[in-house]
Amino acid sequence: MITVLSGGVGAARLLRALSDVIAPSQITAVVNVGDDMVLHGLSICPDLDTITYTLAGLNNDELGWGLTGETWRVMNELEALGGEAWFRLGDRDLATHLYRTQRLADGATKTAVALELALRHGVAVRLLPVTNDTVTTEFVTAEGRLSFQEYFVRRHHDVVVRSIEFVGAERASATPEVLDALREASRIVIAPSNPLISIDPILQIPGVREIVRTRRDDVVAVSPLIGGEALKGPAARLLGELGFEVSAVGVVDVYQGLVGTWIIDEADAELAERIRHRGARVEITTTVMAEADNARRLATVVLS
Amino acid sequence: MITVLSGGVGAARLLRALSDVIAPSQITAVVNVGDDMVLHGLSICPDLDTITYTLAGLNNDELGWGLTGETWRVMNELEALGGEAWFRLGDRDLATHLYRTQRLADGATKTAVALELALRHGVAVRLLPVTNDTVTTEFVTAEGRLSFQEYFVRRHHDVVVRSIEFVGAERASATPEVLDALREASRIVIAPSNPLISIDPILQIPGVREIVRTRRDDVVAVSPLIGGEALKGPAARLLGELGFEVSAVGVVDVYQGLVGTWIIDEADAELAERIRHRGARVEITTTVMAEADNARRLATVVLS
């Protein structure tokens, strides 16, 4: 049994690759909820949905987000009505949000809904939101406080960030399923997700960081930075803005004291010595998962 | 200036006919909100939307509800996910509900949203929900308490009703715009909507019935029953179940003391004497609005 701390796209790809190498039912993903939001009254969980869609083979590779074969009838009408349409919700995707919102209104937990949606999509990896409580990632920027999607989608993460806050995190509780999955896993994997806005909000939930720390020898992290750049998103920029080195070494510093083994890309081989100097083992392989062969090789290294 | 107490389909047709005879901007509709609900987290106002769509020429005549050219992508997906899909929300229609829900979350009133949506659809009739407060029609039936749409859509109004309650009505406030529209209209029209579940929840909002009563001489009502039957919906059945005569005379009794002039269908001419006996004037004409000519003739009688 392995447990993977997961953001969205990068984590989804690693989980898919891991599912090719071991039985999906052996894998638990503990998923970030900091990007979750209510928009148009609908409860939206972008990271959970990205993982579910990707593992179901329904991810839209052209867009890089959302569902394949998506249509935009509702959004186009909403735009014509003068509604807020900058956060694009496809028609198929909307069904997920309607389903979740109604189930939550009926009293179901976010955990229960995530498992139901995974089941409906035939996804055998166990997907667990880190908490059923509301935790909201907010960006304190030069231009004021922005919500996650205002920063990420509306502003295309092109604004200077001074600090990041996870509102509600200190009062939130990790679910019992999550705590068990962290305690009982033979290996804890930190996916190559954004360390500051995908993984950190998981670690900030009381109890999570402490368990990961005690299990350090069994913790394997895949660097989300290759040659000082992220494949997608603002990880590199945010590391620099928040005072970290813009490289895999900067990511190692974010996870200080938590990771036993680092997996870095061949392009970063010369950083290995500095990482070992910080007390971690280092494995060097291809960490780009665009090709299935490479992704499986990475998964094998993660599991070895 | 005339003010029309309005439910859904029947009122929408009368409003459309009136708009053919006088300037739409001279007409105010005071609209029932008792069927309003939150489903999948979305705020849905069926009567306001039916009127808006009909006056915009976007009503779906084939279905008898909803929008023309509608598609069902979201509902079909929701059904595939195992979600609650018995209340069918089309893709175009959903945009209305997303728009309203977000605007209400932003702090707009239901009144403001109704006027915005009317404006977007080029509807010049002034559409006013009777109240911005939450009023919820509930049915006490032989099989327990049912919400409006559980009774109306899910159970196809095929269950015995013992009583009808408008939860929240006594604490609700009619909007100032509604009270002014009732006080200042040269004529108040009661549309041929269901008296017990479309018009009564308007009259139950404190202040409304009292104003209508003082203006009785200027109140014109169109009977929703023709030959003891409603064109659509459970009006006849409900009148009987709640102890009223199942005819236009039963409707007169529901509106006791409120109506100066009754307009009844030619098929009901023999009821005229009994209605006059109850102290009202009676006009006899065709009240079926399926053909535009008849609808305009009815509108002319209403205005004469």
Image (tube, coloured by chain):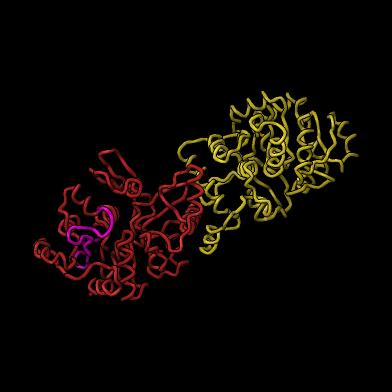
Chain colours: A red, B yellow
Relative to residue B47, is residue A192 depicted above or below? Answer: below
Identify the residue at image location x=66%, y=29%: B26
Q: Quadrant of residue B22?
A: top right
Identify the residue at image location x=31%, y=71%: A17
Asked if residue B34 shows in the view, the reply is: no
- Disc count in the image? 0
Residue B95 in the figure: left or right of residue A9: right
- Asked whether B81 falls inside the magenta stretch, the response is no
Asked if residue B280 shows in the view, the reply is: yes
Q: Quadrant of the N terminus of chain A?
A: bottom left
Q: Nearer the viewer, residue B30 or B174?
A: B30
Where does the image place residue B14, in percent across and percent down from the top left? 72, 39
Where does the image place residue B13, in percent across and percent down from the top left? 71, 42
Where does the image place residue B234, in percent across and percent down from the top left? 74, 49
Residue A49 in the figure: left or right of residue B71: left
Relative to residue A281, is residue A240 depicted above or below? Answer: above
Residue A76 in the figure: left or right of residue A208: right
Q: Which residues are magenta?
A: A212-234
Q: Quadrant of residue A25?
A: bottom left
Identify the residue at image location x=80%, y=30%: B261
Q: Quadrant of the C terminus of chain A?
A: bottom left
Where does the image place residue A214, in percent across and percent down from the top left? 21, 62
